[in-house]
Image (cartoon, helix red, strand yellow):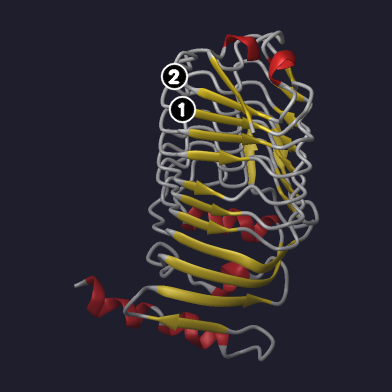
């Protein structure tokens, strides 16, 4: 029944898309996918009709997106501006060629706080609670992923970040239980507190050159992670950063001098099995450093 009615419901949408040569819409009924150019920030609700928005599963956006657009995207992805569940079924979202701009309505509200868009920022709570999302490609222009931006996106399996993102905020991907892959781009400097806590399916963590800080509990309870690579520039590993990573079998730290580890950085890791690889000439200093000295096997390479 739905497949028969769906093209009819799209007629108002297609007609609306033809009114303005500057704003284009491409729709494929068989795959429920769309490509939309948002030439005017705030116009997404006029380009995807209310009848169609809950049926779109794959969406590619170009153009300029403000708070009004993000609020509409949230509804399409399963959560409204208050975080309540919607009927949206958006699974795959490609924003690589889009720009986040300031303005428009708040996209999220919590208690007395209203969250509004900022230029080139994936804002705090951007897609918080959007339980339909499976795969997201972020804008190439993005420089920060805000606090709780993808918090509790339980079905999210893949996020593609681009070079230019320098910070991942607190709780950014917390409890994304199905998250399997996330590329941490060159230039990233900070991974915030609890940023990837409870991402049970992550298997490896390769922090890029330039990273300075791994936040407290950043990768706590990532119970499938087997390998962690820390670049030379890491200075601080926060409290409980890798606590609960019980499958961890290999840590590679490229810093000649051990980064400062706060208490419990590797709590619940099996120190009798997990091997710590360090630069040549650094074994003795690691063997005396707090937290690092707990590893039974410290191997120079």
Residue at image x 56%, y 23%? 242
Disc 1 designates what residue? 249
**From this viewpoint, is residue 274 visible?**
yes
**Residue at horizontal 66 percent and vertical 26 percent from the top:** 193
- Structural crowding at the residue carrying mark 1, measured as other residues with C-alpha within 10 Å and reported as few (<14), some (14–19) or many (≥20): some
Secondary structure of the residue carrying numbered label 2: loop
Q: Is residue 83 visible?
A: no
- Label count reads 2
State left or right for residue 256 relative to residue 125: right
Please tell me which residue lies in front, 51 or 30. Answer: 30
Nearer to me, 93 or 80: 93
Q: CA distance from mark 2 to mark 1?
A: 6 Å
Report the residue at 44% width, 19% height from top. Answer: 273
Name the side, left or right, on which 139 lies relative to 151.
right
Residue indicated by mark 2: 273
Instruction: Give the image quarter of residue 1.
Output: bottom left
Examine the rendered structure and indicate whether residue 106 appears above or below residue 104.
above
CB contact under 8 Å: marks 2 and 1: yes
Horizontal and vertical percent for residue 283?
69, 19
Of helix, strand and loop, which one carries label 1? loop
């Amino acid at each position: 029944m739905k497949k028969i009615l769906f093209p009819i419901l799209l007629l108002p949408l297609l007609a609306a898309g033809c009114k303005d040569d500057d704003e284009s819409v491409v729709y494929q009924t068989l795959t429920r996918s769309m490509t939309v150019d948002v030439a005017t920030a705030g116009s997404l609700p006029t380009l995807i009709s209310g009848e169609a928005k809950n049926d779109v599963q794959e969406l590619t956006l170009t153009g300029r997106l403000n708070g009004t657009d993000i609020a509409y995207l949230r509804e399409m992805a399963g959560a409204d501006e208050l975080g309540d569940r919607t009927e949206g079924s958006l699974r795959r979202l490609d924003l690589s060629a889009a720009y986040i701009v300031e303005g428009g309505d708040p996209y999220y509200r919590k208690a007395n706080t209203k969250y509004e868009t900022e230029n080139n920022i994936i804002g705090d709570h951007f897609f918080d609670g959007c339980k339909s999302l499976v795969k997201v490609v972020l804008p190439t222009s993005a420089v920060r992923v805000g606090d709780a931006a993808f918090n509790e996106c339980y079905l999210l399996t893949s996020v593609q970040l681009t070079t230019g993102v320098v910070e991942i905020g607190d709780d950014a991907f917390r409890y994304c239980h199905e998250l399997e892959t996330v590329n941490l781009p060159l230039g990233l400097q900070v991974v915030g507190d609890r940023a990837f806590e409870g991402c049970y399916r992550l298997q490896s963590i390769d922090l890029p050159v330039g990273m300075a800080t791994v936040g407290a509990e950043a990768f706590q309870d990532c119970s499938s992670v087997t390998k962690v690579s820390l670049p030379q520039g890491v200075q601080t590993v926060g409290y409980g950063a890798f606590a609960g990573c019980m499958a961890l079998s290999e840590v590679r730290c490229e810093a000649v001098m051990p980064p400062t580890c706060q208490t419990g950085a590797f709590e619940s890791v099996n120190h009798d099995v997990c091997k710590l690889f360090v630069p040549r000439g650094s074994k003795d200093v690691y063997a005396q450093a707090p937290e690092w000295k707990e590893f039974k096997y410290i191997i120079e390479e």
